[in-house]
Image (spheres, coloured by chain):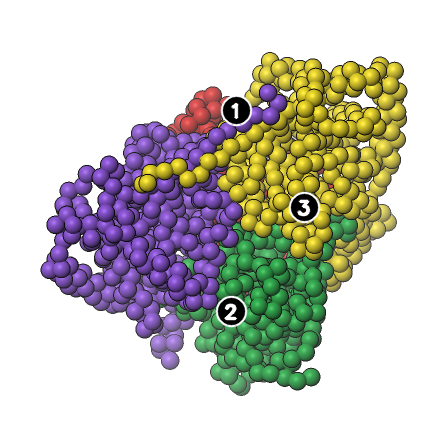
Chain colours: A purple, B green, C yellow, D red
């Protein structure tokens, strides 16, 4: 047969909890009350953490900051699918995952206030924020590969945006993962924009999930504002990874409700109407409706929760703001042992500082 | 020629407007340069005037931007490609070192590559990691590439026009600390500043002070603190090819020099400048040349960044030390 | 529908001329005698050029050289589908394309004998050899894009190997091509190896052609030892490109019959039996059988052809070997105008040379 | 300790064998390093001994190799990654500059990155484009990265073992011209040479001659041509961190120096060495330090390559010139 079809491929879409809080009974994950409350609490905490950060930034008390408003389901749903021993590799918008993974709020604020010292006590298996887009994909594949080579049944999970799929490192990482069947879960937070560039202009492929097929493994698209879908699919992918089934890419279809960062003005490139459409799909609202329907949640609990979280955040901000990094930390962590030229440079700086003080 | 008071962003924007108007082969490309007008608003208004075929929002891929721009440049266009921050320019080094800089050489003139890469540059704006770096060494060390960095709105316009018209690839770095730091009179019309020429900003007898980009301002401030000394301030403007003539002439006269840069000290351009002074004016030297530079560490996040960047006090101190040697 | 198939994709395979020289009548391209003879002649010339290069290399008269033995159909079939005005971007194994595009044999030998001066008279629209794998993909996309922006109806065509598909630049180039619908044809010479790495270990995807689907455009796999299939498919892809239909990737399934380069020993990583299997699929042999069946070719013409080509090659080698590049060319072509420091360095070198001569 | 006569390829191969045997976390990865044994046969035999989980043939992707190796290093392995030729190392600069070199710094010691990148280095073997380049500057200028280049089989083994055991990332360059150029006695057992230390190969009074890698041999040849002069030859061995102590001590004694390197002159390490001499020993200098280097051009293809590379005659000439100054 001289002309014939030799490859046939497809991509699925998954949603479980719709914007009105209705659940698909066949797909509904079996989660107890406590777990659901934890999901909800962490999503609300993430949103309030975020909101506080934006306020601080406006007051000049923080660096440029990228809000995760609207993406809380993707972050929290995937994070709670992980085990503590799984490696987590964030981009820069994964506040929700970091919070769910137990990184103290105070450290997150210290980082975004401008000090690497936030990471002095970073809990293990949580990697540092990656600013250069998509570079962390390779690290996650390497860490997963290491686990596999060391016969550990742990996985690694890496986060990146729709824009990140255009970078060479994304490609090289996906390909290594396919070839070496590394236990890696690729979470693409497709929030529809890379700064001002809309998803359709980022790539001509119909979905981002289908990119996985180019590397010989499965890609799936889920409703990223549906915490149950994100959780279920991540859980399955991690389980598959840990048991030798290789990598999976999960495209979480969500929306960046806020600006790209505090330096960005999204009105330049998108319509208010579009944002309003997505507001109806809010991930927290729909989880709350689901919990209310289940009788797990009510206004009283909501009020208590908000009060509790407000207190936590105030305390974290206070602690973070009082932190002053020692100058020598600039030199101390470049190498395990400080080489001669850095000693000289540190002395030069410290000499200069004391001289100025003396003047 | 009429003049307008412009800051550096406006001056660069004006240069882009004018060159695009004058030469239909000039185009602008990069991440968020179109509809958004660039994250620093440097390309604002261009897309409305020239359309999305000449002001192109690209996917998020730095090697892709430079590599496709090379293909365009080779086939008759003059792309001005933006890399959003200097800290992501590392991803372009392969295409620049292996290709852009060698196309004329490798093809023995059959092809050439009139490409400009623009990127914001350097520290002092309280930014995230990789957004405060001074990365000139990587590009200066690539034969066949030119490297330019202006220190004022006037120079920015004139140097960018020259870069666009240059038949060879140019990396044009824009000191982001100066983007909106001050305005000065900039001619409305077109003018060029020849690449490869430094400029004496002041005449002096006692000491030669050498800088570029945002450090020129720091040096000017420092000079206010050492008014008793007669300092000859040189703004290099082009880092590659290096105008060692202006440096050597000055050092032969003053016998003393201080070099100021944000780049990490080891193999920052200061090293090469000292090497050239050593080769061409050693006997005139009355004191060791001193470098006031970034340290050999990653640029710290903002809470410690001020300790990293050379400031007027450190520079003034160095001037006094060298003058007193 | 909470779980549903949302993307469906496929890849085709094409072959027209089988290893015994039998043609599929429905797909057979309508080529006249002269054209078929030109195909054949160029394939034989490529093989003999190559053979001579290997001999010269063994005698120390050439640099390391990568033979295209066995890949002549891919090179020649695709090359003759181009128009002179289409841009051609080679990797380093495209001798057959270069020959078909009219680059004088002498220049090819000068280059592989170690001088850039080969390119002093390189015919326009043929780009220089790209040594770093896959980097040229971006240039081809850029050139195609430029043509589109300048409203020229020309295409660009770029060659790379199976190994090249793993590099970031391949990915970024394919993605730009998809987004901007650039008139680019991507010819992947899947010769089953990247030095020692077999195709299956390069990527876990079933075909290389399907990678195009990740960028939203068509990929097809053709029998790369079948000059008619390669020609037909390239012709169609170029035509589509020139008329605004965007990019296409063509995976030509072929085999590197020789070593990776003259520095390589393939017995370390592959079996003789595998090579023998592929020898049966030889592209030149099958074209010759086809021509013979058509009555266009016979032993007499073969003998004449070989003699003719032998002469051409001898002459080209002789001319190439007598070429001595001027030393100043090292400095002359770095910039349009030689900067001061290069003048000084050139003077330094020339001063040193004359001093030595004087001693 | 018993000794064997080994060339540099054999010495490196032995070091890899021994470190892999000793430490189960050490692994080798790269293009063609497994079944093929490496294009220069440096990793020959490893896969048979240690299997394909510890000697890994990777896909063709340099950033991928280094980036995944970083992930491995962070999680407790010690990858020794090969980049097949130095001219393809440009593709690794981003992962090295943005990540490997900063992981300890950024994480404040929570993570570190014990990674070795090996690559053949430099010219003189009549190779294709990008196969003859000396690219050290790009890596020396990255704070947090170490750069090593041996000049002999003995040093290659000792320095590689130190590099593998180093808790920080090291770029280990192997001068390919020396791979099989000569054999010398190399101890069978393990030994280390501390990183960051240069070595005086000869004691001398008249002039300090500084080199590394393949240029050390060129310098030794040159010294044969200037036997009337007493030359102190220093082999730096580690380019970063730079052992300026051994240089300064020597120059203080001799008052004259010649630096020889294959790298393009502008911002080759020679520049930094001159800067350090200027800073720490200027008053001892009796003549300008001279650089004999590659030119500021792309390395020419072999027909002109000999004019590019410093050779004994050029070095001898420079020595005489500086000595006579
Ligand atoms: C390599 C690189 N290039 C450019 C940038 C500047 N930048 C920061 S975020 C961003 C957009 C990222 O888009 P996406 O991957 O979709 O993530 P999102 O911001 O939407 O979460 C860009 C261009 C960067 N950080 N890294
Ligand atoms: C970026 C880069 N890495 C490594 C090499 C060394 N190298 C030359 S050819 C080759 C294999 C290429 O394989 P493939 O793309 O399949 O092309 P083929 O040689 O089979 O024609 C390698 C690894 C290179 N030239 N460029
Ligand atoms: Mg996004
Ligand atoms: Mg191949």
Which residue is rendered at x = 20% and y = 53% of the image?
A289
Label 1, label 2: how many angstroms apart (C-alpha)? 53 Å
Query: The residue marked by circle 1 belongs to what chain?
Result: D
Query: The residue marked by circle 3 belongs to what chain?
Result: C
* Residue D253: % across, % down: 58, 56
| The N terminus of chain D, quarter of image | top left
* Residue B6: % across, % down: 56, 79
Which residue is rendered at x = 48% and y = 83% of the image?
B225
Judge whether residue D75 can be spotted in this image: no
| Tag shown at residue D46 | none
Q: Nearer the viewer, residue D322 or A56?
A: A56
**A256 left or right of D318 in image:** left
Circle 3: element type: loop
**A177 left or right of B81 in image:** left
Disc 2 marks which residue? B41
Q: Is residue B21 above or below residue A330?
A: below
Which residue is rendered at x = 37% and y = 41% of the image?
A13
Query: The residue marked by circle 2 belongs to what chain?
Result: B
* Residue A51: % across, % down: 28, 64
Q: Nearer the viewer's eye, disc 1 or disc 2?
A: 2
Q: Are discs 3 and 2 located on one and the same chain? A: no
| Tag shown at residue D35 | 1
CB of mark 3 within 8 Å of CB of mark 1? no
Circle 1: element type: loop
Q: Is residue A199 above or below residue A66?
A: above
Q: Is residue B133 above or below residue C133?
A: below
Q: Tell me which corner region of the image, top left, top right, bottom left or bottom right, holds residue B238.
A: bottom right
Q: Nearer the viewer's eye, disc 3 or disc 1?
A: 3
Mark 1 CB near ligand 2 (8 Å cut): no
Disc 3 marks which residue? C243
């Amino acid at each position: 047969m001289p002309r014939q079809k030799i490859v046939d491929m497809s991509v699925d879409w998954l949603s479980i909890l719709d914007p009105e809080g209705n659940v698909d009974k066949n797909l509904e994950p079996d989660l107890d009350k406590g777990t659901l409350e934890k999901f909800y609490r962490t999503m609300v905490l993430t949103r309030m953490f975020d909101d506080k950060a934006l306020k601080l930034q406006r007051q000049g008390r923080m660096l440029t900051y990228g809000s995760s408003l609207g993406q809380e389901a993707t972050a929290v749903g995937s994070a709670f699918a992980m085990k503590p021993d799984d490696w987590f590799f964030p981009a820069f918008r994964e506040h929700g995952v970091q919070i769910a993974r137990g990184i103290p709020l105070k450290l997150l604020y210290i980082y975004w206030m401008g000090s690497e010292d936030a990471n002095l006590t970073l809990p293990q298996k949580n990697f540092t924020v990656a600013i250069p887009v998509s570079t962390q994909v390779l690290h996650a594949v390497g860490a997963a590969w290491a686990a596999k080579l060391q016969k550990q049944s742990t996985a690694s999970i890496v986060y990146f945006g729709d824009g990140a799929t255009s970078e060479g490192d994304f490609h090289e990482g996906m390909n290594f993962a396919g070839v070496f069947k590394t236990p890696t879960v690729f979470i693409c937070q497709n929030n529809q924009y890379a700064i001002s560039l809309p998803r359709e202009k980022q790539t001509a492929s119909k979905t981002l999930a289908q990119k996985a097929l180019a590397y010989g493994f499965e890609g799936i698209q889920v409703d990223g504002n549906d915490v149950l879908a994100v959780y279920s699919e991540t859980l399955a992918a991690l389980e598959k990874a840990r048991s030798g089934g290789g990598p999976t890419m999960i495209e979480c279809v969500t929306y960046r409700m806020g600006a790209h960062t505090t330096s960005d003005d999204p009105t330049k490139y998108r319509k208010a109407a579009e944002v309003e459409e997505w507001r109806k799909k809010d991930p927290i609202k729909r989880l709350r409706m689901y919990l209310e329907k289940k009788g797990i949640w009510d206004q009283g609990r909501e009020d208590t929760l908000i009060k509790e979280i407000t207190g936590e955040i105030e305390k974290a901000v206070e602690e973070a703001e009082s932190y002053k990094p020692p100058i020598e930390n600039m030199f101390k962590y470049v190498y395990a042992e400080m080489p001669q030229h850095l000693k000289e440079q540190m002395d030069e700086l410290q000499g200069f500082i004391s001289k100025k003080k003396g003047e | 020629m009429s003049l307008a008071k412009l800051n550096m962003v406006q001056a660069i924007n004006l240069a882009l407007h004018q060159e695009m108007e004058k030469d239909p082969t000039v185009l602008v490309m990069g991440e968020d340069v179109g509809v958004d007008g660039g994250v620093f608003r440097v390309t604002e208004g261009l897309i409305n005037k020239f359309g999305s075929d000449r002001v192109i929002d690209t996917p998020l891929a730095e090697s892709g931007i430079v590599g496709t721009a090379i293909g365009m440049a080779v086939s008759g266009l003059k792309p001005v490609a933006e890399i959003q921050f200097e800290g992501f320019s590392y991803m372009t080094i392969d295409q620049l070192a292996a290709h852009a800089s060698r196309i004329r050489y490798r093809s023995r003139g059959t092809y050439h590559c009139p490409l400009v890469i623009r990127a914001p540059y350097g520290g002092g704006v309280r930014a995230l990691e990789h957004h405060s770096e001074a990365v000139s060494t990587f590009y200066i060390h690539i034969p066949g590439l030119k490297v330019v960095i202006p220190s004022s709105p006037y120079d920015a316009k004139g140097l960018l026009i020259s870069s666009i018209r240059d038949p060879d690839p140019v990396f044009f770095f824009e000191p982001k600390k100066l983007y909106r730091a001050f305005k000065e009179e900039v001619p409305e019309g077109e003018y060029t500043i020849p690449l490869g020429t430094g400029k004496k900003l002041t005449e002096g007898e006692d000491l030669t002070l050498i800088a570029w980009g945002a450090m020129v301002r720091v040096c000017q401030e420092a000079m206010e603190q050492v008014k008793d000394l007669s300092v000859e301030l040189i703004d290099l403007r082009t880092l590659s090819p290096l105008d060692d003539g202006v440096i050597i002439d000055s050092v032969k006269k003053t016998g003393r020099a201080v070099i100021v840069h944000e780049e990490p000290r080891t193999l920052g351009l200061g090293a090469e400048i000292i090497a050239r002074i050593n080769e061409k004016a050693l006997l005139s030297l009355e004191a060791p040349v001193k470098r006031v530079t970034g340290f050999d560490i990653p640029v710290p996040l903002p809470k410690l960044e001020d300790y990293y960047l050379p400031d007027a006090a450190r520079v003034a101190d160095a001037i006094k030390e060298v003058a007193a040697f």
